[in-house]
Amino acid sequence: MPNYLDQLAEFASRVSYHRLSDSARTAAADVLMDTIGAIIGGSRISENANLARLAAGNSNTGSATLLGHNLKAQPPMAALANATAGVSLEMDEGTRLGGGHPAIHVLPGALAVAEDLGCSGPRLAEALIAGYEVSSRIGGATKTLPNVHSHGTWGTIGTAVAAARLMDFNPHQMRGVINLSASMSPANTWTPCFQGATIRNVYPGRSGMQGVLAPQLLLCGFTPPSDAPTDVYTTILGDEFHPEATVAGLGSGPLRIEQNYFKFHACCLYNHPVLDAVEAIAARENLQHADIQNVNVTTVPFAQRMAQDYPPNMLSAKFHVPYAVAALLVSGRSDITAFYQNSVDNPAIQSLADRVSIISDPSMDLQNPDKPCARVDVALSDGRTFSESTTFHRGDFQRRRSRVELENKFRFLTSPTLSPDQTESVIRTTANFANLENVQTLTALLQPPPSRVLANAGTHPSS
């Protein structure tokens, strides 16, 4: 029987768009649109605009579009800049089943290589699905060390598999790419998230850049170890790796891209079940934040790490449960505007955040459907208390939000950069990209009209 690496390589090199289910095709289209929206939204942050200019400046003959800019770069540099932008607003999709946020680790590199090669929409979909499936499965089979952040950890593998699929690697070559790229896995920590150090946003950019290079390195003659995932994820980045879990059900059930979640709160996933509960209470009881005495949040143990000192900036606010709860109760919002610096500096939000307590419940788990993931109790000054529990957050594949809501999210994120006609064209093109003969038709829509280029840089305050 082939071992797990042979099975993953066989799957990745044989994915065929024409044999996909309608559900898988729809999932790929939705993930494509959503991830593009996250990238264009994040492209306006000042450091990301600077990175895009650096990427273009280091590419004499760039062939890959830097989304949100009238610039091009070589595919590795485009993957670096676009993936970094795409994670910066915490609006990129993910999966609870493992691998963290596969699309932002796969699509930027896949799109850059596909544009460079002039590939069709179906070829891009095959690459996206191959990279998503392999990286998610390897991530789900790994128990990482406590301070290892999932961003970037399996990203080099995801990008490398996608690029290799576009380059028509056979199963033997694909196995080599998986091993070689796993050996390039970056070691990233959670610490910058809590401190608000935006080097954290470069995690998927760096892994994407390396992933684009990995197939080329194999063609250059560089050789990989025989089983790099087991080596790396049991000795350096994790303490458990279960090869059999990477192939359980492979090819016989829904694809991982069909079992994802989309974000509608602009912050870390661990906030989402909590914020769903807060939204439900606020809508039902018409709360006024001035009447709130305190809020008790019972949720998964990791949330304790997200309840330290009050956050100093936008990034750290996205990884702080008391801030997210207070911002929603005070402003009524949890989109990207709720995490801007003027909101972080709002005395009313800070005062209420000081009265939000986090209680750890070890039995709660975001992957457990049999028990709530969060319980919120809001106590008012008049003695009344309101409570709500939630399981899967809204936007998860178990609690899908409508296509209209997903499109409206895309419009909100991209409207400052793209014209209305461009935005609607992207929505139509991604929904029908089975008919796309060349992805360059899509990427041509992802650059702002000249009137918006200078006006947009730095419009999302990040510090």
Image: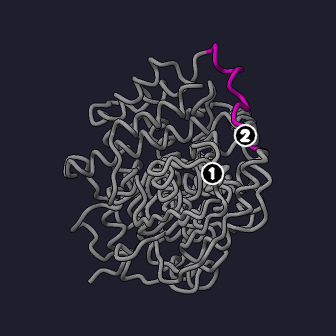
Q: Provide residue 202's location: percent of width, then percent of height.
A: 68, 53
Image quadrant of residue 451? top right
Q: Which of 274 and 4 is in front in this view?
A: 274
Magenta region includes residue 270: no
Q: Earlier in the sequence, mark 1 or mark 2?
A: 2
- The residue under label 1 is 205
Q: Position of residue 402 (x, y in %)?
A: 33, 43
Disc 1 + disc 2, Cβ < 8 Å:
yes
Q: Horizontal placement of 327 versus 22: left or right?
A: right
Rendered view: 240 above or below 157: below
Nearer to us in this view, 459 or 361:
361
For the question of whether residue 58 can be seen, the reply is no
Q: For this view, does 380 lie left or right of residue 438? A: right
Q: Position of residue 9 (x, y in %)?
A: 36, 67
Q: Position of residue 48 (x, y in %)?
A: 70, 40
Q: Is residue 10 above or below residue 164?
A: below
Q: How is the image coloured?
A: one colour
For the residues labelled 1 and 2, the Cα–Cα distance comes to 11 Å
- Of the 4 image quadrants, the one containing the N terminus is bottom left
Whether residue 326 is visible, yes or no, is: yes
Q: Name the residue under label 2.
A: 51
Question: What range is drawn magenta here?
Answer: 450-463
Tell me if 79 is positioned left or right of 199 in this view: left
